[in-house]
Image (spheres, helix red, strand yellow):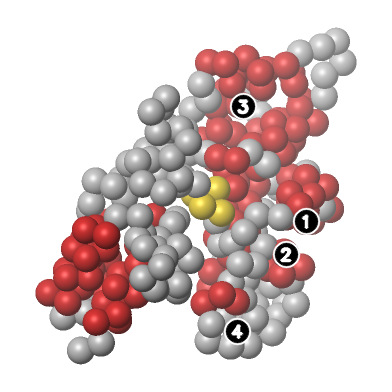
Amino acid sequence: DNPFFARSIANRLWAHYLGRGVVEPIDDMRDTNPATNEPLLKALADHLHDVNFDLKAFTRTLLNSRVYQLSSRSNTSNRDDNQNFSHAAYKALPAEVLLDAISYSTGVPEKFNGWPQGYRAVQVWDNRMPSYFFRIFGRPVRASVCECERSNEPSIAQALHLLNSPEIMQKIQHRRGRARQLAGRKLPPTSIIDELYLGTLGRYPRAEEKTLMLEAFTGDDIDRRAATEDVLWALLNSREFVYNH
């Protein structure tokens, strides 16, 4: 019966999937902070009420909507749009998802203290387990029930960790890792680059990207392994890898 409840929940779920609420900040629901699209927010609240506050049914509607399925690629008319949902917004991956993605892309699983080998980060429920990666990438310690405990905001510490941390380099240079295996096979550099792109970004490189990456394999005394590791390192630090888009 609370007229603000449906609007608040609908706005929160919209922000979770679209990267930005119809009302921002998402919990600042007041007359002097209007929605960017009031008819949209009303329609979302009405729909949530119509499905009897079934969050799965509401989520199904959001994920099947055209606006959720828009590309993140912008054009000249919407490049500067940050509030009208004219294209998908980049969102930082949660800490657990990013660590699993790095482990998969390098071919080296993470070993968590007290957990069997092969467990993924998304399976680890123990919030007391010390992990520098989890801490700097915003995994909550579950000290409160506030959603604000999880932080997906990018930071310099995160960028520096991906660029320079020995833990990431150990995965890239691991003797059983993807880079070492590809470098040890009799593959041309173009095929190595294709395999790395498929294993990290899930797509083939574009022509200009392949030309750029081939420079790592060009020269008189090229170390194939080092070149392969350099390309993998560059892909792990790309915006396309670190962000959901």
Check contact, mark 3 vs mark 4: CB within 8 A: no
Please name the amino acid that badge 3 sits on.
Ile
Mark 1 and mark 2 residues within 8 Å of each other at the beta carbon: yes
Q: Nearer the viewer, mark 2 or mark 3?
A: 2
Mark 1 crowd level (few <14, some 14–19, many ≥20, 10 Å Cα): few
In the image as oriented, which residue stretches furthest toward the left? 50
- Outermost residue, top side: 220
**Nearer the observer, 81 or 211:** 81
State how far apart marks 2 and 4 are (Cα).
15 Å
Residue 157's mark?
Answer: 1
Q: What's the residue type where badge 4 is placed?
A: Arg
Residue plotted at (78% across, 45% down): 163
The residue singled out by tag 3 in the image is 192
Which numbered dot is residue 136? 2
- How far is the residue under mark 3 from the one under mark 4? 42 Å
- Of labels 3 and 1, earlier in sequence is 1
Q: Residue most toward the front?
A: 32
In this figure, which residue is indicated by the disc labeled 4? 142
Q: The N terminus lies in which quarter of the figure?
A: bottom left
**Badge 3 element:** helix
Indicate the amino acid at tag 1: Ala
Mark 1 vs mark 2, CA separation in Å: 7 Å
Q: CA distance from mark 3 to mark 1?
A: 30 Å
Instruction: Tell me whether circle 1 and circle 4 mark residues in contact (CB < 8 Å).
Output: no
First-in-chain label (1 vs 4) = 4
Marks 3, 4: nearer the viewer: 4
